[in-house]
Image (cartoon, rainbow, N blue to C red):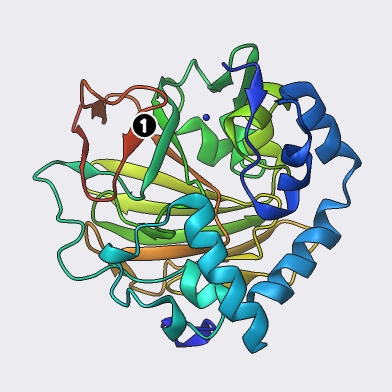
Amino acid sequence: MWAVLQDGHKPTHTMPLPVFNSLRWLPLPVPDALFVLFQHLTPKHALTAFAGWCANGTWSPWVRNVIPWFIGRYGVNMAEAAEPDHRQYATFNEFFTRPLAAGARPLAAATFVSPVDGAISQLGPIAQDQIFQAKGHSYSTRALVGGDAALASQFDNGEFATIYLSPKDYHRIHMPCAGRLRRMIYVPGELFSVNPATARGVPGLFARNERVVCVFDTEHGPLVLVLVGAAIVGSMATRWHGVVNPPRTRDVQEWTYNDVDIRLTQGEEMGRFLLGSTVVMLWPKDTMRFEADWVAERGVRMGEAMGHGG
């Protein structure tokens, strides 16, 4: 199916992607408030479209220079890639969505495993329908899933986890448990950065940004896995659909799969970020108990134990 693809409270902030790094060249640290203001003033959609175009470009001088610069700037571990030689990637996106070598991410013996490499932004109980984003900020499950009250109500007083993928991380997304796909919802929105500084400074961030909501049936109950877009994220893709965006639309779009038997096993790849972002997961009440060492700001790797049945 992938044939259709072309293929973290701190007073200052480190910009996550090259286009926002211009402020880092200033002789003083960049306060969170200035970083957020900069994003409000930036034409994020146009910038993202341009970044996507560049990431798919095959112009040799561009590819030869930007990939090794990115590896050095962000400390990307190429030793665990299936193809460790950066010169073998024809485009930046091909490099960014690189597969891992066999055995690089063994699956733990757990009911739920981490679907990605990244850092835990927040996790824990959903307060009725409110998901904790950062100090002073929460957002509703209904807003996250695009306005569907019936879908959102299934997760009242349940559990959630938000994991942020930094530029150095592996950017394919895998299944935390086995599941059958029921729905996919594309929700248009903003394209703010999703790093910790922006989460502290932009209310309702993950329910404001563009996102792809994937709804699964599992033996533990329904599971929602949301791919959240961000500034410079050229596109998001799923295994069964391919690239979901672009094109970007003004309206919510939905696909249902009740008549199509799409089943994915635990650890199986389900999607990709073409330039990376954040995933948010929702579980119903009494179906998820997180591992004791799963706490905010902790780094995680795809396949490690995340939790067990409630």
The picture places residue 84, in percent across and down from the top left corner, at 32, 73
Quadrant into which the N terminus falls: bottom left
Q: Relative to 130, does residue 266 appear above or below in the rendering?
A: below
**Which of the 4 image quadrants contains residue 243?**
bottom right
- Residue extending farthest front: 27
Local SS, label 1: loop
The picture places residue 180, in percent across and down from the top left corner, at 32, 61
- Residue extending farthest top: 136
Quadrant into which the C terminus falls: top left
The picture places residue 41, in percent across and down from the top left corner, at 91, 40
Q: Image check: 46 left or right of 162?
A: right
Q: What residue is at 71 percent from the left and 26 percent from the top?
A: 29
Q: Which residue is mark 1?
A: 284
105 or 162: nearer the eye? 105
**Which of the 4 image quadrants contains residue 258?**
bottom left
How many numbered marks have been drawn onto this rendered protein structure? 1
Residue 58 in sight: no
Q: What residue is at 69 percent from the left and 57 percent from the top?
A: 232
139 or 291: nearer the eye? 291
Q: What residue is at 88 percent from the left and 52 percent from the top?
A: 43
285 or 193: nearer the eye? 193
Residue 42 in sight: yes
Q: Amino acid at mark 1?
A: Pro
Q: What residue is at 52 percent from the left and 86 percent from the top?
A: 90
Q: Image check: 13 left or right of 4?
A: right
The picture places residue 270, in percent across and down from the top left corner, at 38, 64
Q: Image check: 215 left or right of 56?
A: left
